[in-house]
Image (spheres, rainbow, N blue to C red):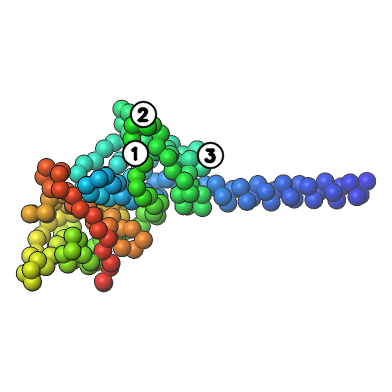
Amino acid sequence: MKTTTIFTAMLIALACAACSKEKDKNGPFDPTKFYITGTIEDNIDSTGYALLFQPNGIAVAVSARKTANATYEFKGGHLKLMLENSSEGFDFIIENNRIVNASALTHTIDLPHTYSLQKTPGTDAFKGKTFKGQINNTAISVTFGNDGTLEVSEVVNDLRITQNGNYALQNNAVAKANVKDIGSVLCIVLDGKLAISTSDATGDTQSYTVLAQVN
């Protein structure tokens, strides 16, 4: 009788251990504390995007060109985002706060070229920081002020061109701005760097690059 009791206890312990591992793998996950970002590409150019998750199943898809409303649900490790008034959207499989697989919900929309799940910081991740790199073989730096302003500086043929603008936070790691002579600018924090996308007024000319933080 005692042997049977010990054997039963072992089975219960093993079962609980299995449950614990499953919980760690697909445990509590709050989409509102994260965002998804990456690139969308076609035959001409690439651009960045961000998927933002708000309370009550409300989501927003943001690019330099436009912003689209959406809804989402998270169930069984699947984070599904559906574009508003459409059957189109994406299904991201989340494990340990990482995207391990993704697919489009319909054949009428392409899956983004790249995607990454990022934790939303608690404060403005742009404020007071400068990022530098190249875009279209042109040296560029983007400096964010402490008052919602930004300065974009490009060096073209040894001539420095500086434009100023204001940025509006979409969340603490995603911001949009309109900069004179550049157009609409989408700024996204990606693994501690700045992913920046631009789109002119017609939406025909776009660019994407990732800049390193220098301060």
Which residue occupies the foreground of this view, 211 or 142? Answer: 211
Q: Is residue 145 visible?
A: no
Residue marked by disc 2: 87
Please identify the quadrant where the C terminus is shown. Answer: bottom left
The correct choice, above or below, for 36 with respect to 211 in the image is: above
The correct choice, above or below, for 66 with respect to 145 in the image is: above
Choose the circle earlier in sequence order: 3 or 1.
Answer: 3
Q: Secondary structure at mark 2?
A: loop
Please give the label number shown on residue 76. Answer: 3
Which residue occupies the foreground of this view, 12 or 68? Answer: 68
Q: Is residue 171 left or right of residue 207?
A: right
Closest to the camera, between mark 2 and mark 3, is 2
Q: Is residue 20 left or right of residue 102?
A: right
Q: Amino acid at mark 2?
A: Ser
Q: Secondary structure at mark 1?
A: loop
Disc 3 crowd rating (10 Å Cα; few below 14, some 14-19, many 20+) is few
Which residue occupies the foreground of this view, 14 or 171? Answer: 14
Disc 1 crowd rating (10 Å Cα; few below 14, some 14-19, many 20+) is some
Q: Amino acid at mark 1?
A: Asp
> For residue 162, what is the image quadrant?
bottom left
Please give the label number shown on residue 110. Answer: 1
How far apart in space, not on screen, are marks 1 and 2 (Cα)? Answer: 13 Å
